[in-house]
Amino acid sequence: MEKACKKNIFLFLFVLIFFGNCGLEDYPYIYPVPQSNAEEGHTLDSRAEVRIPNDNSGTAFTHYVIFYRIYLTNNQEISPSPLTNYNNINPSLYSDYLSIRPYIESTTLVNTNMDTFFRGKGFKYLTLEGANIDRILGSGVLGRTLVIDFSSQNDYPTLEITQNGTLIDGPYVLFRSNDGFVPLPDRYFLNSDVLRNVDNIDENTNADTIDKDADGASLDYAYASFYIVAVGLNQDSYSYIFSTPALIHTFRLP
């Protein structure tokens, strides 16, 4: 009995030493944007402010990325809410959200490759007209506020960086991705007959857009759902690592 106890103690100590020397505690980690930081600045379906924390200073962090997908609909919702309005807008918007929600602020799904995860669901990377979004959303955005504006006060939806209400950078015009497909009628986030034409939706054309089975009803509206993810670089493997996502907002295209 005594020998068995000593054997178990030895095994326990061996496991502790083994895993302690495996560098698990040194696995590079980057912090996500807290979901509450993205929910406080919503203005109906047209504007969102995201407070970017400063906790990624000194980590493997390199920049933030924003994934988006466009959903066509026959319903207009003034203040889109995931659990009450998403299904009315487009069932695919609702199902996408339900599959992404378990990852938001998760403490157990922290090693998921978000590039594979989001692109596997038809999401694309947000870009900017005439600017490198990876630079704009790099270390300079830490501790500041990201503002995405889909209101009619601008000709096109925009992104800007502010601090304490003061404009620091931008505004930049939002651009749809053209990674492997041709966005029609152009790369701007604007509602149009061409964008809403379901004949233009395939892997080669408007691959960032999904239609809706509306029982013959006219699809007069389009919404874009945005998620933000922190990206870092593992210096040992030189591979990208990702934080868990935060839902920025779902905007109606003007």
Image (cartoon, rainbow, N blue to C red):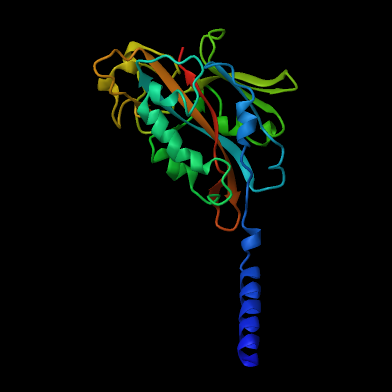
- Examine the image and state in which quarter residue 253 appears: top left
Q: Position of residue 61 (x, y in %)?
A: 63, 44
Residue 214, percent from left and from top: 28, 19
Q: Which residue is pictured at 48% across the width and 28% down the height? A: 82
Is 129 positioned to the left or the right of 73 in the image?
right
Image quarter of residue 74? top left
Residue 96 located left or right of residue 144: left
The N terminus sits in image quarter = bottom right
Q: x, y (%) of residue 138?
A: 63, 35
Foreground of the two, 212 or 138: 212
Q: Residue at x 59, y 58 (%)?
A: 236
Res. 148 visible in picture = no
Report the front residue among 159 and 224: 224
The picture quadrant where one finds residue 140 is: top right
At a point 72% along the width and 32% down the height, the residue shown is: 143
Out of 197 and 213, give the one closest to the viewer.
213
Q: Is residue 22 left or right of residue 217?
A: right
Residue 162 position within the rendered picture, expressed as x and y whole percent measured from the top left: 69, 22
Q: Is residue 150 above or below residue 210?
A: above
User: Is residue 142 depicted above or below 188 in this figure?
Assistant: below
From where the camera sits, is residue 23 visible? yes
Viewer-closest of 110 and 155: 110
| Number of numbered labels in the structure image | 0
The residue sitting at 65% across, 61% down in the picture is 25
Report the residue that reaches farthest toward the front: 1
Q: Is residue 160 above or below residue 124?
A: above
Q: Is residue 22 above or below residue 64?
A: below
